[in-house]
Image (tube, rainbow, N blue to C red):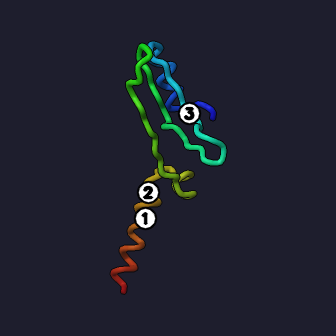
Amino acid sequence: MPMRASSSIVLTSMERFEVRGAYRYGPKGAQFDSPDVLIKDQGKLVIVAECKATKLTYLAQFAEDPFEPATRFGEELDDEEDAA
């Protein structure tokens, strides 16, 4: 698996740490993904990080303010509830 941006940032800004990105392990057909970032200090595992993100909607990806389409959509739902 290629190194994710989160691993790369730690690796380039904190050279003393050994950083490993996500990898797959286990027998074929029953593999698991490791956490996104594993950081060792002097050979000892000190940080395990799992990065989560929500995929932006198409509107939010290209909006000047990515939160505006979500707010507007929420307002539309509220308007529909009021009308019912």
Tell me which residue sits at (58%, 30%) in the image.
3
Tell me: 48 left or right of 8.
left
Q: Amino acid at mark 1?
A: Arg
**Mark 1 falls on what kind of element?**
helix
Tell me which residue sits at (49%, 26%) in the image.
9
Q: In the drawing, what numbered circle is on residue 68?
A: 2
Residue 27: give x, y in percent of width and height.
Answer: 62, 41
Q: CA distance from mark 2 to mark 1?
A: 6 Å
Residue 23: give x, y in percent of width and height.
Answer: 58, 35
Residue 20: give x, y in percent of width and height.
Answer: 53, 26
Residue 52 to residue 79: above or below: above
**Mark 2: few/some/many CA within 10 Å (<14, 14-19, 20+):** few
Task: Give whichever of discs 3 and 1 has the lower sequence position.
Answer: 3
**Mark 1: few/some/many CA within 10 Å (<14, 14-19, 20+):** few
Q: CA distance from mark 3 to mark 2?
A: 28 Å
Question: According to the image, label 3 marks what residue?
Answer: 4
Q: CA distance from mark 3 to mark 1?
A: 33 Å
| Front-lying residue, 26 or 36 | 26
| Front-lying residue, 10 or 38 | 38
Q: Amino acid at mark 2?
A: Glu
Question: According to the image, label 1 marks what residue?
Answer: 72
